[in-house]
C-alpha cells in the first residue's frame, strides 16, 4: 500500500487527502528516504541542478501584529526596533544587483510607516536601477487596492505564508487577525498576477497526519508558485516560549511531499530549518528544495530582525563559500530570476 501511494504520487503528482494522511502516518525511515529520493529526482527533472540564490533584505522589524510565536510582535519590548530608509533599501538592492543577484526579496513586519505610496516609490526606483531583476515583497496583509498598486509599481512576487489551515489555531495564535482575511489576501495576490508564495510552520498546531495533509492539500489547490515551510523555533519573549521546537524530519518530509505534489513550485530553505538542523540547507536541497536566500540586511541591524533567537542566516558575506558548498554538494549556482514553472512570463 505504501509503495503504491509513493509511486502514484511520483507519477501523477497527486494523492487524495486521506492518502496523504496515510502516507504521513506510516512514514518510517525507509519511507522517508524513498519520498526524499523521488522528490530530488522530480526537482532535477523540472529545475535541473540549479539552486537559485535570492538577496534577502529585512528592511523593518516594526510590526503592528501580536503573533504568538514571533519575536518582533509588537508587545516585545526587548527587541531593538529599526527601519531602513528608502535610500538604504535602494543602496542594498543595488549592491546585491552589482554582485549578480537577479531576485531581490524585501521582507519586514507589518509596518504601516511604509505606506503603499512609499513602497511603490521604492519599488519603482529599484526596478529603474536594477532593470532585469525580479522584486519580491514579504510584508504581510494589505487590501487588494494596495496589492494592485504594488504590482503596478513593478513587484513581481509576493510571499505570504498562511501559517496554518486550522481556523481555530490561526485565530488563537494571531490575536486580532482573521483567518478569512489571510486566505482572501492569497487569492487576491494570485488573481492580480503576482507569483504567489504561501507556506506553514511545522509544530504550530498538533501536527497530526490529517492536519499536515490539510496543509499540503491547500498548497496544491492554491498552486502556489513558492512554498515556505519551516519548523517552529520558540522565542523566549512570546507566549509560545515553552513550546517544543518543530520537528526537522517532519519539515523535510513536508518539503519533499510538496515537491512531489507541486513539481513546478519554488521551495526555499527557511532560516528556521538552517538554525536548528545540522547541515540544514544541504538537507533541504536533498529533500527537493531549490532556493537559498543570503541576507543582505546591514550588519548592524540584521541581528535585530529577531523572529526567533540565534537565527542562522545564509550570510551574504560568505557568498563565495556558499557557492562552493552548493557546487561541492553536486548542485549548480544560479543567480538569475529563477521564476516558478507555473509562471507564464506575462504580467497581466
Image (spheres, helix red, strand yellow):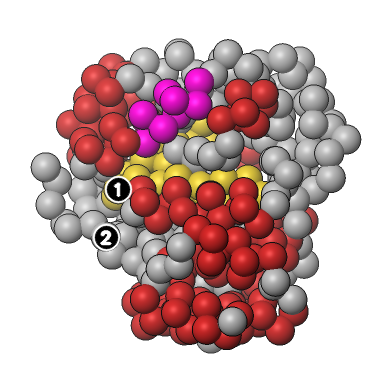
Measuring from the top left, give residue 156's x and y in whole percent: 27, 44
Image quadrant assignment for residue 80: top right
Q: Which residues are magenta?
A: 178-186
| Residue occupied by mark 2 | 342
Image quadrant assignment for residue 29: bottom right
Name the residue at 54% across, 26% down: 109
244 displayed left or right of 226: right
| Residue 158 in view of the camera | yes
Which residue reaches farthest right?
242
Tag count: 2
Choose the circle earlier in sequence order: 2 or 1.
1
Spatial separation of the CA atoms under disc 2 and disc 1:
8 Å
Measuring from the top left, give residue 45's x and y in whole percent: 37, 83
Q: Is residue 306 above or below residue 12?
A: above
Front-lying residue, 126 or 137:
137
Q: Which secondary structure lies at badge 2? A: loop
Asked if the residue at tag 1 contacts the one at tag 2, i.e. Cβ–Cβ closer than 8 Å, the answer is: yes
The N terminus - image quarter = bottom right
Q: Is residue 185 magenta?
A: yes
Q: Estimate how packed mark 2 is, as few (under 14), some (14 to 19) or many (20 or more) residues with alpha carbons within 10 Å.
A: some
Q: Is residue 78 above or below residue 306?
A: above
| Residue occupied by mark 1 | 195
Name the residue at 73% across, 44% down: 206
102 displayed left or right of 26: left
Q: Is residue 160 above or below residue 261?
A: above
Q: Which secondary structure lies at badge 1? A: strand
Name the residue at 54% across, 60% down: 18
Q: Estimate how packed mark 1 is, as few (under 14), some (14 to 19) or many (20 or more) residues with alpha carbons within 10 Å.
A: many
Amino acid at each position: 500500500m505504501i509503495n503504491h501511494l509513493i509511486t502514484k504520487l511520483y507519477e501523477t503528482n497527486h494523492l487524495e487527502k486521506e492518502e496523504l494522511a496515510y502516507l504521513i502516518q506510516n512514514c518510517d525511515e525507509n519511507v522517508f528516504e524513498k519520498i526524499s529520493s523521488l522528490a530530488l529526482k522530480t526537482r532535477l527533472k523540472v529545475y535541473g541542478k540549479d539552486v537559485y540564490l535570492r538577496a534577502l533584505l529585512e528592511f523593518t522589524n516594526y510590526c503592528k501584529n501580536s503573533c504568538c510565536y514571533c519575536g518582533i510582535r509588537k508587545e516585545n519590548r526587548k527587541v531593538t526596533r529599526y527601519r531602513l530608509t528608502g535610500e538604504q533599501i535602494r543602496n542594498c538592492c543595488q549592491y546585491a544587483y552589482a554582485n549578480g543577484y537577479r531576485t531581490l526579496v524585501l521582507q519586514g513586519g507589518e509596518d504601516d510607516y511604509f505606506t503603499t505610496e512609499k513602497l511603490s516609490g521604492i519599488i519603482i526606483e529599484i526596478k529603474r536601477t536594477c532593470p532585469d531583476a525580479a522584486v519580491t515583497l514579504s510584508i504581510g496583509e494589505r487590501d487588494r487596492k494596495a496589492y494592485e498598486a504594488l504590482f503596478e509599481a513593478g513587484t513581481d512576487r509576493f510571499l505570504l505564508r498562511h501559517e496554518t489551515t486550522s481556523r481555530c489555531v490561526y485565530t488563537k495564535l494571531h490575536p486580532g487577525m482573521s483567518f478569512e482575511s489571510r486566505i482572501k489576501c492569497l487569492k487576491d495576490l494570485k488573481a492580480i498576477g503576482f507569483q504567489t508564495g504561501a507556506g506553514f510552520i511545522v509544530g504550530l498546531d498538533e501536527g497530526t497526519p490529517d492536519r499536515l495533509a490539510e496543509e499540503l492539500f491547500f498548497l496544491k489547490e492554491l498552486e502556489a508558485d513558492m512554498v515556505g515551510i519551516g519548523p517552529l523555533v520558540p522565542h523566549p519573549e512570546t507566549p509560545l516560549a515553552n513550546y517544543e521546537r518543530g520537528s526537522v524530519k517532519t519539515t523535510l518530509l513536508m518539503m519533499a511531499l510538496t515537491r512531489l505534489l507541486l513539481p513546478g513550485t519554488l521551495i526555499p530553505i527557511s532560516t528556521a530549518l538552517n538554525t536548528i538542523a545540522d547541515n540544514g540547507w544541504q538537507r533541504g536541497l536533498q529533500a527537493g528544495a531549490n532556493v537559498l536566500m543570503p541576507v543582505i540586511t546591514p550588519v548592524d541591524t540584521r541581528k535585530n530582525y529577531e523572529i526567533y533567537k540565534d537565527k542562522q542566516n545564509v550570510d551574504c558575506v560568505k557568498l563565495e563559500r556558499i557557492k562552493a558548498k552548493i557546487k561541492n554538494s553536486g548542485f549548480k549556482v544560479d543567480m538569475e530570476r529563477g521564476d516558478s514553472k507555473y509562471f507564464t512570463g506575462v504580467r497581466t
